[in-house]
Amino acid sequence: MTRRRFLKAISFSALASSLLACPASQSWLWGQSQSNHRRFRLCLDHRLLGIQASVKELMRLANEHGFESIVPNPRELSQYSRDDLQSLLEEMRLSNLQWGASGLTVNMRTDSEEEYGSGINELPKVAEVLSSAGASRIRTFITPRHDHLTYRMLFRRYVKRIREVATILDDAGLRLGLEYVAPRHLRTSGRYTFIFTLAETMELIEEARKSNVGVVLDSFHWHNARETAADILRLKGSDVIACDLEDAPAGIPIDELTDAPRALPGATGVIDLKTFLGALLQIGFDGPVQVEPMLEEYKTMPAETVLKQVAVSLSQTLLLIE
């Protein structure tokens, strides 16, 4: 039987668990040598899928559905004793699970200095909890418009806040990822347009001059910004803190796409995920890749059903870079 017929003969639901749980052992199936095998890890970011679960529940779900990392919840982890935390980390090690990128608890987008300051004051404790658990990545996003601040004014405010946040995180060994947002309706809904491309985001990061700051790449925003592999290939793998993977709804012109809903990876073929993932593979990105389809039905659908669909879509999509 040929390899192509073999793949067709196996149900994708069965293939998903095998490929996602033990990717390194399946290099013969990917048709790749070990040297150019993917280094990024498939992450179960339950928040992006509308799933409520404790860290122990996430571990079980990740193991059952072939995910390789889960997202830490600093508030929950802060309730663990030192011994309980060490036990949890040993369970993760035995399950070959790593931490994905936690969400930043500081609102860097707010116009309220009081709200921002409150988050900054609490950040050292949050960073200490994540560091104690062995987590190393944290993420947030940048809004692509403002009603009152011009581009330069908002740019300067972000530079100041990024430096403050990154300094606290750096003391705890954490790296900060910034996600740009590109759909046209979001960047034109305010009086002033702000950052919505990878190049602009990297300019902001360079201006902040903090070595522990990088970018969060999202295939949907990459597509909406009309970017190509060349944009990603200008980066080093270490420049990318995390990655979101999804497709776009079919039959909608790019300038009419809205931020939600999106589609599961490979569901429509609108976004060139082969090029997107191939570029990540080429630069040696080694962080978490999670799915963010923003589907309303996922909010009420059983977690098991959601994760089966996501696992199948991921297994099919990863075959693009075999």
Image (cartoon, grey):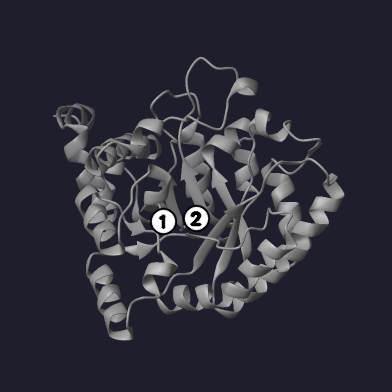
Side of 270 where 124 appears, left or right: right
Task: Mark 2 or mark 1: name the one nearer the start of the chain.
Answer: 1
- In the rendered image, residue 170, in percent from the top left (x then y), is placed at 60, 75
Task: Identify the secondary structure beneath mark 1.
Answer: loop
* Secondary structure of the residue carrying numbered label 2: loop
Q: CA distance from mark 2 to mark 1?
A: 6 Å
Quick one: label 2, few (<14), some, or many (20+) residues within 10 Å?
some
- Residue closer to the observer: 51 or 216: 51
Q: Quadrant of residue 162?
A: bottom right
Q: Residues within 10 Å of mark 1 (few under 14, many from 20)?
A: some
Task: Look at the image and tell me in which quarter the N terminus lies.
Answer: top left
> Which residue is drawn at the image coordinates 26% and 60% (left, top)?
59
- Which residue is drawn at the image coordinates 57% and 67% (left, top)? 175
Q: Which residue is mark 2?
A: 284
Instruction: Read off the residue under disc 1.
Output: 39
Measuring 20% from the left and 39% from the top, which residue is drawn there? Answer: 15
Q: Is residue 125 above or below residue 148?
A: below
What label does residue 207 carry, if any? none
Residue 295 visible, this orientation: yes
Mark 2 touches mark 1? (CB < 8 Å)? yes
Q: Quadrant of residue 208?
A: bottom right
- Left or right: where 279 falls relative to 49: right
Left or right relative to 135: residue 3: left
Q: Residue furthest top?
A: 251
Task: Answer yes or no: is residue 319 visible.
Answer: no
Name the kind of residue labelled 2 in the image. Gly
Q: Tell me where residue 95 appears, x and y as whole percent.
A: 23, 65
Q: Is residue 29 positioned above or below 117 on the image?
A: above
